[in-house]
Structures are given as C-alpha cells and as structure tokens.
Amino acid sequence: MLLFRDPFRVVEKWFEPDKHFIYWDNYDDLAEKINDITTNYEKYWHIVENAHAHVQQYSIEKFMEDLNARLLES
C-alpha cells in the first residue's frame, strides 16, 4: 500500500509504516516510489507479506473463530 502522509495518520492505529505500507509526501515522491518499487520489487516484497499476514487478524474467519471461542467459554 502506498498512502499519502496526512497530518492525522489514522492508519497507524492498525498498521506500521515501512512494515505494512509506505507513505508518500507529494506527487514527485509518489512517482519516485512507484518507479523504485516497480524496478526493485523484491526489495519491497516483505512489506506485501507483512501486510497480508497482519490483515488476517481482521478477517471474517478470525472474527468467527474468536466469537465461537468466547461463546464456548460462556
């Protein structure tokens, strides 16, 4: 994910910069990052893997597993 760095940075409640996504600051920066990523994709692949693994905790399957576990505890 490439995200514009805004002053609020709400996304950081759930994701870590440079671990799960990459910030860009202006259009020149975005163009440079897109060029670098497309040219050196392997250098960024760990971000893709980290983000994919991280979002699994928010999947509907994980939600249902947690809900069922809580219901069984009651």
Image: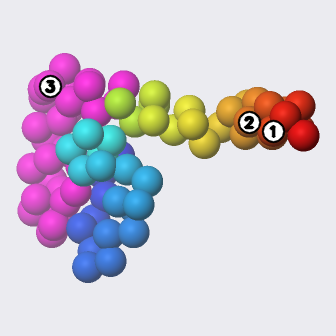
**What's the image's color scheme?**
rainbow
Residue at x 32%, y 69% (from the top left corner): 9
Closer to the camera, 62 or 3? Answer: 62
Instruction: Report which residue position mark 2 lands on.
Output: 66
Residue position marked by numbered label 3 in the rendering:
43
Q: Which mark is residue 35?
A: none
The residue carrying pointer 1 sits among few (fewer than 14), some (14 to 19) or many (20 or more) residues within 10 Å by Cα, namely few
Q: Which residues are magenta?
A: 22-49
Q: Indicate whether 73 appears above or below 28.
A: above
Mark 2 residue type:
Asp
Q: Amino acid at mark 3?
A: Lys
Indicate whether 25 appears above or below 68. Answer: below
The reply, left or right, for residue 67 in relation to residue 13 is right
Quadrant that contains the C terminus:
top right
24 in the magenta segment: yes
- The picture places residue 56, in percent across and down from the top left corner, at 56, 32
| Crowdedness near tag 2: few (<14), some (14–19) or many (≥20) residues, C-alpha within 10 Å | few
Q: Residue at left 26%, top 79%?
A: 7
Amino acid carrying mark 1 in the image: Arg
Image spot of residue 65 (x, y percent): 76, 30
Say which residue label 1 marks: 70
Say which residue appears at 26% left-offset and 24% top-offset.
Answer: 45
Q: Nearer the viewer, residue 28 or 72?
A: 72
73 on left or right of 13: right
- The quadrant where residue 52 appears: top left
Confirm whether residue 15 shows in the render: yes
| Alpha carbon distance from label 1 to label 3 | 41 Å
